[in-house]
Image (spheres, rainbow, N blue to C red):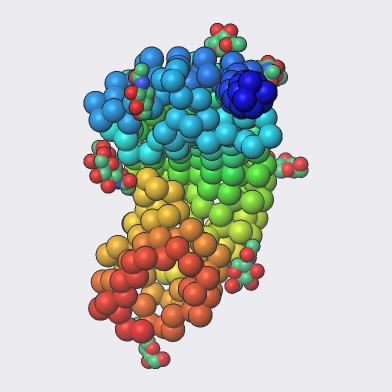
Amino acid sequence: MAILQLVVFILVCGILSLRLESVTSRRIIGNETDRLSLFEFKSRMNDPNGALGSWNDSIHFCNWAGVTCGHRHQRVISLHLRGKGLGGNISPFIGNLSFLHVLDIANNSLHGGIPQEIGNLIRIQHLEFDNNTFQGELPTSMSNCTFLRMVGFSNNNLVGKIPVEFTSLSRLEIISMNSNGFRGDIPASFGNMSFLQVISFSGNGLQGRIPNSLSQLTKLYWLSLSSNKLYGIENLVDLNLLSMEEKFLKGNIPSTVAKLSKLHENRLSGQIPSSIGNLTLLFDLSLEFNNFNLTIPSSLGNCQQLQFLALEYNNL
Ligand SMILES: *[C@@H]1O[C@H](CO)[C@@H](O)[C@H](O)[C@H]1NC(C)=O
Ligand SMILES: *[C@@H]1O[C@H](CO)[C@@H](O)[C@H](O)[C@H]1NC(C)=O
Ligand SMILES: *[C@@H]1O[C@H](CO)[C@@H](O)[C@H](O)[C@H]1NC(C)=O
Ligand SMILES: *[C@@H]1O[C@H](CO)[C@@H](O)[C@H](O)[C@H]1NC(C)=O
Ligand SMILES: *[C@@H]1O[C@H](CO)[C@@H](O)[C@H](O)[C@H]1NC(C)=O
Ligand SMILES: *[C@@H]1O[C@H](CO)[C@@H](O)[C@H](O)[C@H]1NC(C)=O
Ligand SMILES: *[C@@H]1O[C@H](CO)[C@@H](O)[C@H](O)[C@H]1NC(C)=O
Ligand SMILES: *[C@@H]1O[C@H](CO)[C@@H](O)[C@H](O)[C@H]1NC(C)=O
Ligand SMILES: *[C@@H]1O[C@H](CO)[C@@H](O)[C@H](O)[C@H]1NC(C)=O
């Protein structure tokens, strides 16, 4: 009997210490810097909906709402806080989340400047800041984020020039900066960013000649430059996209960056390029009130995310 009790006691102790060990080792493995950075990030947030309610010490930060960690090192790899009703501004501590790949804080009410420290996020691939009220200029330090594939700053109050330094973002596929106060010209060196698929700059104060070099962008499907003071689009005849007659697309790639693509109330004619099938993130395609006189390319079937397709009043 005594031996049995002893065995049970040892077993219970073993299980307890194992559980304790797994809890503490999770704390140690998870980088303290990431935990601290997230707390600093939260401290500047105004969170009326309690979206960050789980961001407390009784839960490991890898399990906080919107946070995803990598399996191996328990470092934060993505932060998805889109449309959570967050106010406040971005702590410079964000730059210490050095394993971050995705930062999606679009569609909130965030304001203030975009911190220089963003440039420390050397692994970042997606930055989505659309639909907030961020102010000031884009930090040139972002040119160090050479793994960036998508940047979205549409619908903010950003000003200044489009930094020529962005040309070093050689993997960039989507740049969306509609409806801000950007001025100056489009740097000619953008023609060297050969992975660009979407350039969306409508609704700014850009001026000057659209650089001919953009016609080198063989992967570009979407160029949205309306409501600026730009000229010279007719030199870009090589662009697939411009097989559409209306040169300045009035619709824009809205804030959700290429998940939503509208050509609403454009007077477009000519072919819908079959390359539309390469916009695999395409979510909403509205071509109604256009004047398409053509066939629907079968490649549209590649747009697997497509949820809304409006083709009424066309001549298809
Ligand atoms: C921590 O977050 C969890 C999940 O939201 C919640 O149940 C718990 O009450 C919170 N703890 C504290 C101390 O706020
Ligand atoms: C943006 O957030 C609001 C609520 O804050 C929501 O109603 C709206 O659907 C969101 N839009 C997108 C495109 O996520
Ligand atoms: C994190 O970032 C802040 C502000 O940029 C800085 O003061 C701090 O020293 C950084 N390092 C750590 C380990 O938190
Ligand atoms: C934690 O992150 C900081 C900042 O990125 C880094 O300097 C440090 O080496 C990391 N420590 C561990 C144990 O991963
Ligand atoms: C932008 O954010 C506001 C406020 O959260 C929301 O009402 C609106 O639907 C959002 N618009 C888009 C296009 O996401
Ligand atoms: C890019 O990073 C390097 C090395 O960390 C640094 O010296 C340089 O100042 C950074 N560039 C910008 C524009 O911040
Ligand atoms: C594009 O890159 C080439 C080769 O690196 C360079 O010679 C050229 O000046 C660049 N063009 C622009 C407009 O920056
Ligand atoms: C884009 O689409 C065209 C026509 O469907 C196709 O030939 C081409 O290979 C595609 N390019 C990429 C990068 O997927
Ligand atoms: C539409 O196609 C028909 C038949 O191919 C052609 O006769 C007509 O001129 C075209 N209309 C326009 C506006 O291109």
Looking at the picture, does residue 251 appear above or below residue 163? below
Q: Which quadrant, please, contains the C terminus?
A: bottom left
On screen, residue 262 versus residue 9, left or right, reads: left
Q: Is residue 272 left or right of residue 77?
A: left
Considering depth in this image, is 83 or 198 the residue closer to the camera? Answer: 83
Q: Is residue 300 above or below residue 75?
A: below
Question: Image height check: is 85 above or below 290?
Answer: above
For this view, does 302 lie left or right of residue 108?
A: right
Ligand 6 quadrant assignment: top right
Q: Which residue is the extreme one toward the front?
A: 1
- In which quadrant is the N terminus drawn? top right
**Residue 269: image x %, image y %?**
39, 74
Q: Nearer the viewer, residue 307 or 226?
A: 307
Is residue 187 something one can see in this rendering?
A: no
Q: Residue at 40%, 52% (x, y): give it.
A: 253
What percent of the width, then of the height, locates residue 260? 38, 56
Please report the residue visible at 68 percent of the width from the left and 34 percent of the height from the top. Answer: 72
Q: Position of residue 273 (x, y in %)?
A: 51, 72
Instruction: Give the quadrant of residue 95.
Output: top right
Residue shown at 62%/55% (left/top)?
A: 217
Whole-percent x and y of residue 2? Answer: 63, 21
Q: Is residue 3 above or below residue 294?
A: above
Q: Where is residue 265, by image quadrant?
A: bottom left
Between 153 and 104, the residue placed more toward the observer is: 104
In this view of the protein, can residue 196 be seen by the observer?
yes
Where residue 76 sits, quadrant-wise, is top right
- At 64% from the left and 37% from the top, the residue drawn is 71
From the viewer's perspective, is 144 left or right of 293? right
